[in-house]
Image: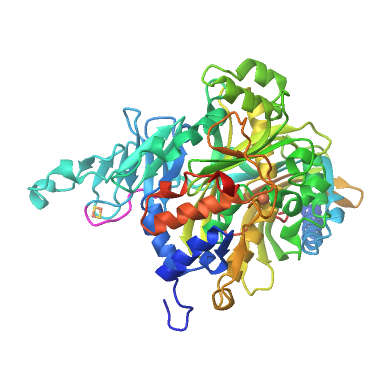
Amino acid sequence: MAAGDKPSVTEQALQDARDSLDEGFFPLEFFHDENLHDLEMERIFGQAWVFIGHESEIPEPGDYARRYIGDDAFIFVRDESGEVNLLFDSCRHRGAQVCRAEQGNTSHFRCPYHGWTYKNDGDAAGIPQKSKAFKNLDREEYGLAHVPRLETYEGLVFASLAEEGPSFEEWLGDFKWYFDVHMKLPEGGMEVIGEPHRWVIDANWKTIADNFNGDSYHTAWAHGSVLDLELGGEETVGHAGTGDSLDRHIHCDGHTTSMRGFEDEDVFLTYPEGVVEDLFTKEDLSDAQWKLARQALSFTGAIFPNFGFLHFGDTTDDPEKDVAPFFTIRKWRPLGPDKMELWSWGLAPKNAPEEFKERMYKMYTSNFGPTGNFEQDDVPIWKGITESANGQFASSQNLQLNYQMGLEWMSEMELDDEWLGPGFAYSENLEEGGMRLFHEQWYEMLAGNDRTDATGTPMNVQEDQ
Amino acid sequence: MLAEREEQLEALLVEREVEQFLYYEAELLDNRELHEWFDHVADDINYRMPRRLMRENTASVFSERGYYFNEDYGSLKARVERFDSEYAWAERPPTRTRRYVTNVRVTRDDEALAEDELFVEANLLVYLSRGDSEKHTFFSARREDVLRRRGDTFEIADREIRLDQTVLSTDNISIFL
Ligand code: FES
Ligand SMILES: [Fe+2]
């Protein structure tokens, strides 16, 4: 850090921040700090399960896509036997990168430096003039390095840089119950349409993590234009805490989802009747999961630390046209304390009619991604928070962001005792416990503790603790 | 000989008309006179911006399914009208833009074209500067339009914007290209 820059966050400051989370506070300065960024890369992104891509992006042997975990570039590739690999993109000779394109298909990766070649499962295939130049080198030991751990869940591929730690299944915990509803509702599952949107923004990654962990409060205000234009229904875009909808904020094993829906109605995220009848299946879902899907109008959510999703009904790209749903997943990849790359994918039920899939993709781009009528207005806000966190003032004044909404002395927040799924469901969406839960886990990992130290108790409703 | 000359002159005049229209259009968009701009959008428009792909051996490949924009008249109109809302924060204050339209080429003998339509290719460079900051960025793109004569002006009957970036360096795309 250059001389004259603000002092770095100390252990004590971290501990204080953890303590003040119980009061619903978190320091603004933590949204722009070089040292914290380095710690986050090491202790969170070096350990956590990070989303890589969906199998449907690389359907054929040899299909590959360049993907990242933090600062590390990998090749996400399906080999000749059909297996999915994640290979570190660095030649085992002297480190040059062997994958140049964003996506493609190849049987081999060729190093441009001295010509070592690798099969698409990473094995070293050719070393020029090996018998003279590297006669005692064991080719088998010189394949491209595989990421230590790679797991696939319903086509979604996640990886971890850590050799050891919880399995992805353990990481996801009971939150799987909720994500199953998205991935298994249509027979044949979901697939990615096209290629992900990517864009780099000058904002700290925790700003968007906050947003996806249950910021129902911002929707009607930040996205008031969508409401003004009637591009989204009142219950999808309208003010949190209003209307007749069944609104729940759910925290489950460190991950969160917020939903809006209608009790005992057949909503099914406004999927058209034909799709519901022909494709939606109870087969892989419990009665309770089916009931949740049936009642749901929209879901937003996040899997710790950097995966988010939106599955919305009742939106349109044109007030004259019928509403339709969209389903989008995303990751935010930190590039620095004030920079991240957003990756955003549009999905649709694999076995839906082509025309409907196209409509869903259209709904996705109309609402989210860089051209989305919602998303256009989010990003500049996150940028602003990051900028405010940068100077002297945030730290010299010890400015604290307020996440008190939903704490017992702030509002009437109850747990829904009858809730049909795992985790804790809050009876209102006017609460910011999901964000506090995010920051608690962030703290535990940064402090070198177990992430699950943060995930056992409800974040609101003090008497339940 | 003379007839040939006249044809060339005629082509030159058409080119000039097209260029003047594109400059005028750029000015409307730079001034954020979006409704005036939208008056020049044909009601059968298809306004597309496909996602550019980056491939090992091929330049200029675009996704078959993925895009940023794929608008018809109604959805483009909604996008224009959205900016009338006081909640359309991305453009409050408006992005300061300057569009540079160059390398204009006009073709008429495309079979798909109607009598009164022209196929127009151009390069587009947009300078963007936002907020209380010295920072700026650019969009660079190739544009392929079908322009249709309407009185003494044109309307945009079809537009494909072929952006040069695969990873965008802007917060969003809250302008029209
Ligand atoms: S660095 Fe790859 S062959 Fe030498
Ligand atoms: Fe938002």
Q: Give the quarter of the figure containing the N terminus of chain A.
A: bottom left
In percent of the image, x 77 and y 56: which residue is there?
B88
In percent of the image, x 48 and y 32: which residue is there?
A56
Q: Position of residue A24 (x, y in %)?
A: 59, 58
Q: Is residue B113 left or right of residue A293?
A: right
What secondary structure predominates along the stretch shown in magenta?
A: loop
Q: Nearer the viewer, residue A268 or A134?
A: A268
Residue numbers of the magenta segment = A93-100
Q: Is residue A304 left or right of residue A429?
A: left
Q: Is residue B49 left or right of residue A100?
A: right
> Does residue A443 appear in the picture of this structure?
yes
Q: Quick check: A272 above or below B165?
A: above
The color scheme shown is rainbow
In percent of the image, x 63 and y 27: which residue is there?
A293
How many dots with numbers?
0
Please check the rendered image and state whether residue A99 is part of the magenta-colored stretch, yes or no.
Answer: yes
Q: Position of residue A262 (x, y in %)?
A: 73, 30
> Does residue A63 appear in the picture of this structure?
no
Residue farthest to the right, as pictured: B151
Q: Nearer the viewer, residue A366 or A299?
A: A299
Residue farthest to the front, as pictured: A463
Q: Is residue A264 left or right of residue A120?
A: right
Q: Position of residue A145 (x, y in %)?
A: 27, 46
Q: Position of residue B168 (x, y in %)?
A: 57, 55
Q: Quadrant of residue A359?
A: top right
Q: Quick check: A114 above or below B47?
A: below
Q: Nearer the viewer, residue A363 or A211?
A: A211
Q: Nearer the viewer, residue A404 or B144?
A: A404
